[in-house]
Amino acid sequence: MNKIIIFILFLIPILQFVNGFSDNDDIVVLYLEAPLFFQKFGTLLADINAFHSGLGFYSLNSNETFQVDFVAVPGVLESILPNRIENGEIIWNTSGKVQFSDTIDNSGYWSSMKEIMIINNQIFETFLCWAQNYNETLSYYQLFDVLNRDTDELLVKSVVCNDFVWAGFNSLYNLGGNYINQSIVASRDIVTLYTRQSIEYVQDGSTNPEIIAFYEAMLKISLPSNQTINSLIQEISELFKGNFYLYVNGDYYNVTLDSSPFSFAYSETPLPKGERDLSNITLLEACYHDQSSSNDIKNGKNGIGGGWIFIIILVSFTTVYMVGGILINKFKNNKSGLDLIPNKDSWSGLGNLISDGIGFIKSKATGSTSGENGYSRL
């Protein structure tokens, strides 16, 4: 009997691990926002509504939650300034990472949780596969859009938390997600550098003397707590006479800044709409799906649900336990017949334990306190 109890205790963490959204769940997608930088830099970004953003998911059926967001590692500042300049080379310590959490942070970190759309578990699983592809493909963090002010051509695209969130909205919508209502809107931060010229790729930028001089001066710029981000960019622009060397995932670009070089906007940004089409989703490779309907798209990478994982583990463990026990009893203990069954006495009493358990549940449901299979109050 002790072995059965140990076996059940062994299964408890497995049951907790596989617990999550079920196939029949209706899942609400949340747009999460949290204030950025205020505690670290005082009023530096407080006047321009700088937010970190992410996606939350919660089940209307089970109240299970999940959280996904894209972060700069170790931080946003490290994506703008190098770690150090050493032996004539610029050294960076920056990357971007998609974070997955099996619960939404309810500590007060998120200041806003806005309901955007409703999806099912099949869409959610395919989204997780897409998010992992995003994580592996866009593994860097780049703060700035670079825009030609004359032509409105986007020369360099940012890779920040908001870009991940809007790409996530696009994936969820085209996979079959339905908006809470048709008038739903959402706002995001966009940081833009302006130029009126084409940008120039700089070969071997990390050892280029001009770029080294640029970032040496950047590292010397002070960040007083009462300085605004606009004045900081203006100081940089004046210091380098409009030449800005932008670092993007190992590459360097020479951007000739406009006379008004910078903007930080927090404004409503269109959500995806129109005809749904899986071809509108980038980075969906290896996420195999059945396209028989927009709400019946399965994720091949995560196609086995938690329940099936538990059953497979349970059957495998039981098989190994029974076969191993029978072999030991036969060849080592010289037993035969029903005595070959490991812990036969314990298993023979399992039926009574199940019956007692059913009786106990029934007594709780009916309000009975005693009976053939019930338990009396103490």
Image (tube, rainbow, N blue to C red):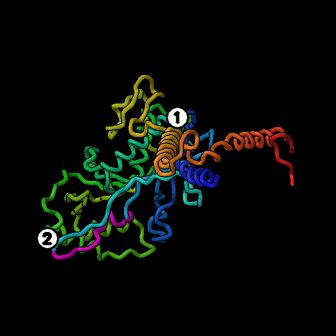
369 to 74, vertically: above or below: above
Q: Give the residue at mark 1.
A: 120
Which residue, as the protein is rendered here, is positioned at the far top? 292
Q: Disc 2 on helix, strand or loop? A: helix
Q: Give the residue at mark 2.
A: 209
87 to 135, vertically: above or below: below
- Give the number of callouts: 2
101 to 181, vertically: above or below: below
Question: Which one is in front in this view, the residue at disc 1 or the one at disc 2?
Answer: 1
What is the spatial separation of the Cα atoms under label 1 and label 2, in whole angstroms?
A: 54 Å
Q: Residue at x 47, y 46 (%)?
A: 327
Residue range (magenta): 74-87
In this image, 214 relative to 68: left or right?
A: left
Q: Residue at x 42, y 71 (%)?
A: 227
Does the magenta segment cover residue 82?
yes
What amino acid is found at the position of numbered circle 2 in the picture? Pro
Choose the circle earlier in sequence order: 1 or 2: 1
Residue 116 appearing in the image: no
